[in-house]
Structures are given as structure tokens and as C-alpha cells.
Amino acid sequence: MADLLSIGLSGLSANKTSLSVTGHNITNVNTPGFSRQDAVQATRNPQFSGAGYIGSGTTLVDIRRTYSEFLTTQVRSSTALSSDVEAYRGQIEQLDSLLAGTTTGITPSLQKFFSALQTAAEDPANIPARQLVLSEAEGLAKRFNTVSDRITEQNSFINKQMVAVSDQVNRLATSIASYNDAIAKASANGQQPNDLLDAREEAVRQLSTYVGVTVVAQDDNSLNLFVGSGQPLVVGSTTSRLEVGPGQGDPTRFEVSFVSGGSRQGITSLLTGGELGGLIRYRAETLDPTLNSLGRLALAVSDQVNTQLGQGLDLKGQVGTALFGDYNDTALAQLRVRAFASNTSNVQPALNITDTSVLTTSDYRLEYDGSNYSARRLSDGAAMTINPSSPGSYPATLTFTDAAGRDQGFELAIDSAPAAADKFLLQPTRRGATTISAQLDQPDQLAFAAPLRSEANLQNRGNGVIGQPAIDNVQDPLVPADLQALSPLTMTYSAPVAPATAGTLTLSAPGGVTFSPATLSITPGQSNTLSYMITSGGSTLEVSQAFSGRPESGDTFTLGFNQNGVSDNRNALKLVDLQNKQTVGVDPSMGISTGVSFTDGYGDLVERVGTLTAQARQDSEATGAILKQATNNRDSLSAVNLDEEAANLIKFEQYYNASAQVIQVARSLFDTLINTFR
């Protein structure tokens, strides 16, 4: 009877524990990261009798956690990837809406500006039409400013978000280290602390939503966590931390540092996965290039419009005034260069734009080793050739070309030598859209007239027609006195000696004016293009103009300064032509035809961001599906099934009742035996 009683008691104890485990499963059905547990039983050692071994009941050997390291790792990695893509998508959708919006983008303002120029070109003496050009120019500049401000605000939000995310990473790392310590102590008796393991695994999963981590299990059941390229965030019960603060080169662009003890390492470019990885990837791949592209476009618009206005005359016969502000103002030039926080000198170079048409959308890093300068283009890591790389004296001006000899469109002015190991971040286009402004406020100062004009002598006997001259080379600056000094330049026609030969125009001008060639060939009755060079004072003019009709020998034509060209719109038409002229992103080795127009340049930017946005949405759907599948796979093994647990409750209750019945039988047998001997 004693043996039977012991067997019954072992069954009661085992099934009571099974009921407790089942109840624990049911109450934690909604606990994040909880893994279903099972009570594992085994038979006790049997007792030998003459007839053989007799069983002695059951015993509880383990509370087993239903867990798969493979499935959990899948969930963890899928979580990091999905959070990365979601963070990227959330930011780029805002940027796409800003750039492509019909009311928020640059395209509508560009179209209004050039439409106003077209209207003014149709009636160049109309003051209200000229005033509209000034108004639309101001609107265009403010639109650039506004879009740039919105993008800059997004950068500020990313900075704040990176700080908040790093705080969460550090909090979870500390929590995981505490779990490691508790689990190591609890595991000393050889059994697994299931609930602590689940809590730690959930903390690691939550950490994966913020940053991608590599998890390495240790023999004492602790987990070591690594970020970036192997930086140890958690080792046993010891933690390091992530700190986010202003970058060394650009304080407006926060960077992530890994801090362990007294050492600090910048790991921004090494981090992937999670919300932090997504924000960093978005900033590097989309935000910074977009801001640079926008700045390059603003610089190109300002440069091309101002340059063309400087090639014409206003209503007063004066050289045109710049419509937009000077982008090479000393203060603006210095803002394009950021000295690294680690620099030991106070040298502040100035970056001047020399050719907006060949500017790239990249930033550059300049380093000085004490005697020589070196630089790299950050977009592709290409080394730049600097001339001179080792200035013999200061102040010095440095120019930059790539391996193919292509000019980068800017130069650096340095007043004194930096200290050895000093570094500078060069941002030629970053602030272009922020600083563009319309400065002209007098409509009569818009230079719509061309500086030269031609006419035929009214006494000519033939019907030769000479077109209006165009100056093909940029005059920097245009000097009216030099143009007045060449007036009038006379062209005298001589008929061909034989009918099949060409006639000639012989050029003559006031003293001190030279021209080349002195004689131009003319084919009567056909369209001819006259091309010649004039040197007057300090100006060299490359002139081209059309000539047609059949002149008679002795007919003369004149070219001179366009003193009273109030109704002349030739320079205004050239301003209008800038809308479709390929002046952005030109490859100087391939010629002007390799660039794009203002509208196409902005269109390319919008298209690129739109393509990346569409890709981000597709990636979001894909990674979301992968995460859902990984979670379902894990839950199918480890999650609590209430139907199954309800069935277990009934089963273990029956087992418990049966074990109690065994005890009841043992008692009855014992009572019968005792009563027999009374």
C-alpha cells in the first residue's frame, strides 16, 4: 500500500505542476515574446522484486520552453530590415510630395518666371511687363528658399529622431545586460529560467527595431550583442553606448559615435538596419544629394540669368544690372567651407564658384598634411587633383579637377596655411537654394536690348539685307566705351569678278579698332553667315550675323553701338532661351550638349526621388510580408494556442483526479488490512 500511495502522490504532484504550467501559458497568451512551456515527466527508478522490477511512479524532470533559435533569428533580422525600410519610406514620401507638388515644387515658379520674360520680350519698353519679371524672379527665389528650408527642417527632424532612437538603444542594451546577469545566475543550477529568456529575447527584438544587431550566444546562456562592423554593444552584463551629436565636419548633420569606456569611435556609416539605419541611409542616399541638386539648380539659374543680363543694355543704354544676388559674396563663399571640429588652426577658406554649368552634386573633403593638400569627392570617393597641391606662398587659390581632367566648377581661396592634419568639408552647392535672392528692384534696369546693331545704307542700290549682330563670347564685363569706340564699323560690298565667284565685304573702322578677317566672302542670292572678331580697347568681340539678298558694288552696311535700343528685345529673347538651354551638369570634355536645361534638371531630380519613393513602397510591402511570415513561423511553434491549452486543462484535470483515485484505493486497502488484524 505504501508503494501505491507513493505512486499516487507522484502523479498528483506532477499533474499539479502541469496544470500550473498550462495556467501560466494561458495567462501569458498576450505577453509579447512569450514562448509556450511544457512540463516534461519521466518515470521514477523502479524497485526490484522477486517477480521483476515494479514501477514507483513519475517525476518532473524539466519545464521545457518551446523555442527555435533559427526562427527567432529570422524574426529579429526581418524586424531590423522592415524598420529600416519603414523609416526610409516615411521620410522620402514627404520629400517626394514637396518636390513634385504643383504648389510646393520649383517647376511652377520657373515656368511663371520665363513666361513673364516672354511677355516682356514681346514689348520690351513696357514697364508693367518688366515689373512682372521682377516679381516672378522674387517669387522664384523665395520658392527655392522655401523648398530648401523644408528639406533643412527634415534634416533637423532626423537629427532629433536619431537622438531619441539612440536613447532607446542604450536603454534596451542596459536591460539586456541585466537579463544576462540574472539568467547567468539562475542557470547556475543547471535549469533554464524560461521567463527571463523570453523577456530578454523580446528586448533584443525591440532593439532590432531601432538598429541592426548581431547576436552571439555564450556558454553561460548570456548573449553578446554587436553593432556596426563588430562594435560590442553588450558583452555579458557590461554595456557600451551610442551617442548622437553634431558631426565633426558638418554640425548640422548629426553623427553616431560608439562610446566604450574612455574611447569613442564614429560609426555612422557602419550602421545598418532598424530605424536608425533607415534614417542614416535616407539622409546619405536621398536627402543630401537632393539638397545639393536643388542648390546647383539655384546657382545655375542665378548665374545664367545674371550673365545674360550683363551682355545687354537697359532702357537707359547702360549695361544690365544683375537680377539675382552675388553667390560669390565673401560671407556666402565662407559658408561653403566647414572646418572640422578637430582642427587646431583657425583658418577659414572661402569657396568661390567659377562655373555653375560643370558643378556636381557632391561634397568634397580636403585634407592638409603640413605641406600638401589632398581631396576626395565624397559621392564616389574619387581622388581630386589639386593645383597647386603645395602652395609656395599665401594667400593661395586651389583649383580641383578629377582623374579625367574635368574641372569641378569651383576654387578655394586660402589666406594662410592650415595646421597639419586639418580637414575641411567643401559644400559647393549645399546652400545654393537657401541663399538665392532677387536684388534688382528697378524694372528699367533690365537689359533687354543687345549692345550692337547693324543697318544698311539707305542709298544702297542693291537689295542686300544684313542681320542684327550677336556677340558670341561672354563679355566679362561688357564695356560700352569700347563698343562706342568701334562705331561705326563699315562694310563695303564688292561684286564678284566672275559670275561663279563670291563677292566680298571689306571692313573698315575708326583708328585703334582691329578686326579679323578684314574681308568677308559673300555669295549673292543666298543666305550667308558672317563671322569675324573685333578688338576695341580692352574688349574682344566674336560677332556673327546673317547676310542675304543681292547687293550692288559699293553698297555699304554699318555696325555700331546700340545707343537708343529701347524697343530692342534681342537680349530678352536670349533670356527666354535660357529655359531650354543645356546649362546644368555639363561635362566640359564633351561639350555643352551633355548638360540639361533648368526644367529638365529639376525634372530629373523629381524623377529620381519619385523612383526611389516607389522603390521604397515596394520594399516596404516586401519586407512587411517577410516579417509577417517570419513572425507566423515563430508563433506556429512558440505561441500559446488557447484551444490546445484548454484541452490540456481537461486532460491534466483527469490525470489529477485519477492520481487522487489511486491514493483513495491505497487508503482503502490499508484500512482493510488494519481491520483484518483487529
Image: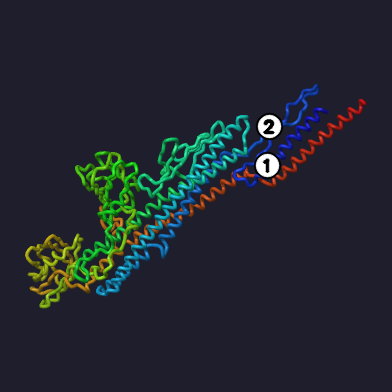
Residue type at the position of mark 2: Val
Residue 55 position (above or below residue 164): above
Give the residue drawn at x 19%, y 61%.
477
In percent of width and height, residue 160 lies at 45, 50
Left of 67 or right of it: where is 252?
left
Tell me which numbered mark, 1 or 2, is placed earlier along the sequence: 1
Q: Where 562 falls versus 351 (above or below)?
A: below
Quadrant in the picture for the N terminus: top right
Per the image, label 1 sits on a secondary structure element best described as: helix
Kindly indicate the quadrant of the structure image that contains residue 545.
bottom left
Q: Which residue is mark 2?
A: 61
Structural crowding at the residue carrying mark 1, measured as other residues with C-alpha within 10 Å and reported as few (<14), some (14–19) or many (≥20): few
Q: Residue 358: horizontal and vertical position, in percent?
A: 28, 54
In space, the residues marked 1 and 2 are separated at their CA atoms by 18 Å
Residue 24's tag is 1
Across and down, in percent, residue 6 comes to: 78, 30
Check disc 1 and give the amino acid type: His
x, y percentage for residue 654?
77, 40
Could one spot residue 135 in this view of the protein? yes
Q: Residues within 10 Å of mark 2 (few under 14, many from 20)?
A: few
Q: Tell me, what colour scheme is on the image?
A: rainbow
